[in-house]
């Protein structure tokens, strides 16, 4: 039994992806045109890479919006295609698996067609569909009420003249009243206050000392005994001792394990889980995977990848303390027996599982 597996993380909800998988108009935009033939559907796959003719599709299992299983017949070939949708933190994970049940196929070309459709055209259609679901219309509401406008027409005839004369009389009376009020409330002129006459000061009478009165001899103060203050003896202060600062704990080495998620003719899908047992997050980690001769890495989830010869280097965000990071990658290998890489290491330490 030969199986082709493709998995991709999409930043869209499962309901939207389900529409793209099951509605004929949307399916034709990213995979192939289709039409209903009785209780079955005919996909126009003739001419697509890995397909030799149109494909007749029969629904085997339908559980919206989680799982869709189809039985596909293409000329003398029969396959079983399963699409599974799983919600994840930032969207959904789509897993597509096709198993050959009868006949033969070019699995490598067919896998390439699936990968291009699922990782290239499908995300573009989902973005377009998300844009179509946004309501960009604006309500154009008019006025909800109209206020009546009353024109102010000028008075005419004798009535107008009487009103003008009355208004002039009122203004004149108001002017006179205001003038009288100002006159009555004006401040009175102030006269300078008379300064009091200066009175000559009487000379101070000095009493002459009589010649017969004895002079008082001033007594000298007796010096008091002075006390000698004893200076306190200085006490030696203890010099402060320095407490050595605690050093941060040494970072624990990362550990990694490898697992082959699925394999197929001319390739497989691998997974590396990087674990951080330490008490602090670990940035700047590196995972290296050594592939076989002429093997190349395809789509990668969970890290950035660069390939230099057979060695593929993965780097990514910091691994949280006590947490892990998962890397999944597709490998195309011309060796029919290859189901895993030849080597795997994280920061130089070998991965478990190989």
Image (cartoon, grey):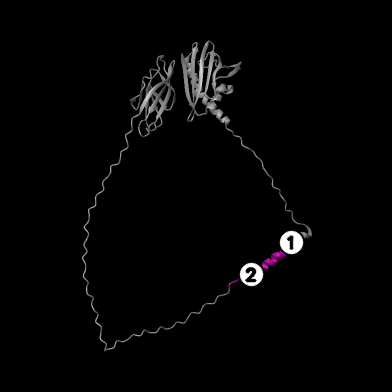
Which residue is labeled 2 in the image? 181
From which residue to which does the magenta span run?
162-187
Element at label 1: helix
Q: At which x and y percent is residue 17? A: 53, 25
At 72% from the left edge and 65% from the top edge, which residue is drawn?
169
Across and down, in percent, residue 225 comes to: 21, 70
**Spot occupied by residue 281 in the image (x, y as percentages of width and height):** 38, 33
Q: In this view, does 278 lie above or below 166?
A: above
Please tell me whether residue 152 is drawn above or below residue 84 in the rendered image: below
Q: Does the magenta stretch include residue 108?
A: no
Would you say 168 lies left or right of 225 here? right
Q: Quadrant of the C terminus?
A: top left
Q: Which of 329 and 236 is in front in this view?
A: 236
Give how far across and how far down residue 332 sits, in percent: 43, 18
Q: In this view, does 9 lie to the left or right of 237?
A: right
Quadrant of the image occupied by residue 260: top left
Q: How crowded is mark 1: few (under 14 residues within 10 Å), some or many (20 or more)?
A: few
Q: What element carries label 2?
A: helix
Residue at 41% over, 26% down: 327
Would residue 173 be counted in the magenta stretch? yes
* Mark closer to the observer (1, 2): 2
Marking on residue 164: 1
What's the magenta bit mostly, secondary-structure-wise? Answer: helix
Give yes or no for contact between labels 1 and 2 (Cβ–Cβ under 8 Å).
no
Depth order, front residue of 212/238:
238
Question: Dot 2, crowdedness within 10 Å: few (<14), some or many (≥20)?
Answer: few
- The answer to which of marks 1 and 2 sits earlier in the sequence is 1
Determine whether 213 is above or below 141 in the image.
below
- Numbered tag placed on residue 323 in the rendering: none
Please give left or right for residue 163 compared with residue 212 in the image: right
Residue 268 placement: quadrant: top left
């Amino acid at each position: 039994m030969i199986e082709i597996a493709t998995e991709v993380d999409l930043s869209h909800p499962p309901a939207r992806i389900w529409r793209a998988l099951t509605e004929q108009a949307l399916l034709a935009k990213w995979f192939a045109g289709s039409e209903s033939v009785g209780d079955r559907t005919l996909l126009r796959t003739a001419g697509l890479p890995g397909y030799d003719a149109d494909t007749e599709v029969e629904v085997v299992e339908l559980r919206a919006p989680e799982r869709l299983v189809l039985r596909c017949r293409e000329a003398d070939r029969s396959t079983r295609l399963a699409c599974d949708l799983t919600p994840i933190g930032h969207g959904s994970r789509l897993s597509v698996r096709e198993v050959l049940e009868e006949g033969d196929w070019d699995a490598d070309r067919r896998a390439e067609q699936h990968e291009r459709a699922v990782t290239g055209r499908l995300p573009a259609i989902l973005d377009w569909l998300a844009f179509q679901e946004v309501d960009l219309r604006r309500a154009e509401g008019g006025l909800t009420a109209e206020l009546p406008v009353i024109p102010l027409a000028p008075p005419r005839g004798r009535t107008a003249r009487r009103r003008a004369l009355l208004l002039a009389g009122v203004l004149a009376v108001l002017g006179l009243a205001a003038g009288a009020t100002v006159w009555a409330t004006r401040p009175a002129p102030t006269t300078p206050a008379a300064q009091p006459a200066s009175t000559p000061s009487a000379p101070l009478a000095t009493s002459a000392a009589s010649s017969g009165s004895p002079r008082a001899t001033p007594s000298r103060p007796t010096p008091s005994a002075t006390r000698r203050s004893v200076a306190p003896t200085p006490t030696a202060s203890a010099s402060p001792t320095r407490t050595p600062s605690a050093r941060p704990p040494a970072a624990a080495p990362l550990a990694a394990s490898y697992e082959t998620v699925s394999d197929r003719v001319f390739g497989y899908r691998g997974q590396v889980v990087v674990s951080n047992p330490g008490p602090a997050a670990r940035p700047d980690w590196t995972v290296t995977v050594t592939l076989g001769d002429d093997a190349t890495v395809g789509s990668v989830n969970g890290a950035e990848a660069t390939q230099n010869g057979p060695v593929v280097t993965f780097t990514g965000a910091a691994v949280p303390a006590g947490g892990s990071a998962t890397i999944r990658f597709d490998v195309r290998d011309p060796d029919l027996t290859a189901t895993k890489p030849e080597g795997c290491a994280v920061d130089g330490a070998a991965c478990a599982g190989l």
